[in-house]
Image (spheres, rainbow, N blue to C red):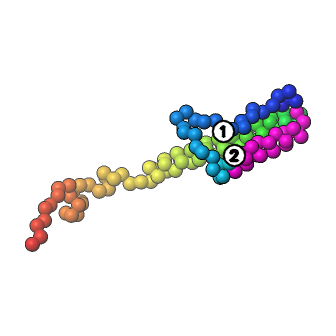
Amino acid sequence: MTDNQQLPVNPQPEEQPGEEQQTPNAFNQFVDHQRRAFEEAGRAVDALLPEGFKEHSQKARSEFLNGFRVLVDAAVENLEKSSQELDRAFRRNAPDAAASAPEDDRPPSTGRTKVKVQVD
């Protein structure tokens, strides 16, 4: 950022459409002053740093994030591959439900029809 450029100043919070103007109380005033102090502190630190530092910092941050993006993408890919292999192994070793438990082998209490029981 050059000396001619400045960050946008927002001295008062903008009123949202449809939002009623509230009477300022002590806490809201405190929050507003703290927000302004934080913005000014950011501008002060920004003014101390030379342009070259800011430019290289931005590039370093971008490369750092790209490195993690590659790492996370590789981890997701390996997890998906492992999940597919696990599914295949599970299906290969799982007994066929229709072949191992035919309808006739069920105990009488687990049949398809419901039995109404009357209790006195």
Q: CA distance from mark 1 to mark 2?
A: 8 Å
Mark closest to the chain's N terminus, 1 or 2: 1
Residue linked to disc 2: 32
Residue 119 visible? The answer is: yes
* Quadrant position of the C terminus in the picture: bottom left
- Amino acid bearing label 2: Asp
- Amino acid bearing label 1: Pro
* Residue 31 as seen in the image, left or right of residue 50: left
Residue placed most toward the observer, 119 or 85: 119
The reply to whether callout 1 and callout 2 are in contact (CB within 8 Å) is yes
* Residue 95 as seen in the image, left or right of residue 25: left
Task: Assign a secondary structure to mark 2.
Answer: helix
Circle 1 Cα neighbour tier, 10 Å, few/some/many (<14 / 14–19 / ≥20): few
Residue 35 place in picture, x, y as percent: 72, 45
Q: Residue at x 46, y 52 (%)?
A: 90
Residue linked to disc 1: 13
Q: Residue at x 42, y 54 (%)?
A: 94
Say if the magenta span includes residue 36.
yes
Picture mark count: 2
> Magenta part of the protein: which range?
30-51
